Image (cartoon, coloured by chain):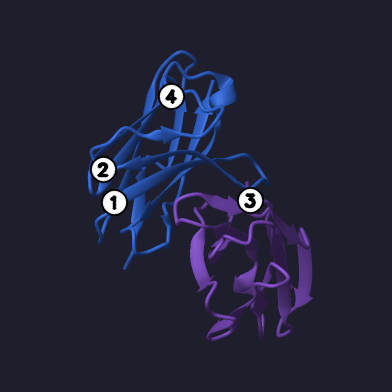
Chain colours: A purple, B blue
C-alpha cells in the first residue's frame, strides 16, 4: 500500500517568515494530494490540494508544489502569522476514498 | 460551503454502555462518509467507509460488531460504539465526500469519547 512520510515533525518560525513542510509518497498511482490544518481539539480543515496533472497551486499565502518524478510534494506558507500555528497533515490518495496521511507537522509561529 | 457537523462534541460514558455519534453534511449531499480515529499527537486512522444505503466497509483490524456504522441518508451517518471500554476512549472524526468526481473530503469537528 501507499506510504506517506512527512517532515519535519515540528517547526518553529518567526512571524513573517516562510514555512515549508515536505511529504514523500511511495505509490506512483496516487493522484490527489490534500493538505489539512488541525487546531487543538478540532477536526482537520482542508487548506489546499493538488492533482497529479498540476505541478503547483497557490492560494494567497499558501502554495503546494508537486514533483511526480521524485514522488514528493510540499506545502509553503509565506508571511506566517500566529494564527497559522497548528498541526498540518499531508495525504495522498488514488481513488479519493482511501487517504494515506502523513504523521503531521506541528507548526509554531513565534510573534 | 462544505460544512460537516458532529454531535456530540464530547461524551463521557461508563464501561459497558453504548454511545452513538452523529455526522451530518450541512450544505451538500455526501455520497460517501468516512470515520477516523485519532490518538493524541498522532495521525488519523481510517476505521471505515460508508456509502448511503450500503453496508460500511471496515479497515483491517476494526471490529465491525463493536463499531456500528449506519449511513441512512445522503446527509447523515452514525457511529455507535457498543459495549464501550476504556481503550475505546479516543477522538473520533468523520469526513464526507460529495461525489465520485470530487476527491475532497471535508472533516467534522470531532467527538472526544471518554469511557470510565
Q: CA distance from mark 1 to mark 4?
A: 21 Å
Q: Is residue B29 left or right of residue A29?
A: left
Task: State the residue at coordinates (68%, 46%).
Answer: B41
Q: Earlier in the sequence, mark 1 or mark 4?
A: 1
The mark lying in front, picked from 4 and 3, is: 3
The mark lying in front, picked from 3 and 2, is 3
Residue B31 tag number: 1
**Mark 1 chain:** B
- Neighbour tally class for label 3: few under 14, some 14-19, many 20 plus, Cα within 10 Å: some
Examine the image and state in which quarter residue B11 appears.
Answer: top left
Q: Is residue A110 visible?
A: no
Q: As rendered, which of B115 and B58 lies closer to the eye?
A: B58
x 44%, y 21%: residue: B66
Report which residue position mark 4 lands on: B64
In this view of the protein, can residue B110 be seen by the observer? Answer: yes
Specify the farthest residue to the top.
B16
Q: Residues within 10 Å of mark 1 (few under 14, many from 20)?
A: some
Amino acid at each position: 500500500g501507499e506510504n506517506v512520510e512527512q517532515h519535519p515533525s515540528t517547526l518553529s518560525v518567526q512571524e513573517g517568515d516562510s514555512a515549508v513542510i515536505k511529504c514523500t509518497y511511495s505509490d506512483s498511482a496516487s493522484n490527489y494530494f490534500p493538505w489539512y490544518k488541525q487546531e487543538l481539539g478540532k477536526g482537520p480543515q482542508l487548506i489546499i490540494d493538488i492533482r497529479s496533472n498540476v505541478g503547483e497551486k497557490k492560494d494567497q499565502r499558501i502554495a503546494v508544489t508537486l514533483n511526480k518524478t521524485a514522488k514528493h510534494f510540499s506545502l509553503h506558507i509565506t508571511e506566517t502569522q500566529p494564527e497559522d500555528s497548528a498541526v498540518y497533515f499531508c495525504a495522498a490518495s488514488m481513488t479519493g476514498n482511501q487517504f494515506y496521511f502523513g504523521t503531521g507537522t506541528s507548526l509554531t509561529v513565534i510573534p | 460551503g462544505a460544512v460537516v457537523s458532529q454531535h456530540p462534541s464530547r461524551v463521557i460514558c461508563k464501561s459497558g454502555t453504548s454511545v452513538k455519534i452523529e455526522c451530518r453534511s450541512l450544505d451538500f449531499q455526501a455520497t460517501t462518509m468516512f470515520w477516523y480515529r485519532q490518538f493524541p499527537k498522532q495521525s488519523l486512522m481510517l476505521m471505515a467507509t460508508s456509502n448511503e444505503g450500503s453496508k460500511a466497509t471496515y479497515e483491517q483490524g476494526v471490529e465491525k460488531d463493536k463499531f456500528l456504522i449506519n449511513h441512512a441518508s445522503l446527509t447523515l451517518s452514525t457511529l455507535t460504539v457498543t459495549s464501550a471500554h476504556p481503550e475505546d476512549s479516543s477522538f473520533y472524526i468523520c469526513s464526507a465526500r460529495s461525489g465520485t468526481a470530487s476527491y475532497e473530503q471535508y472533516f467534522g469537528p470531532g467527538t472526544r469519547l471518554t469511557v470510565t
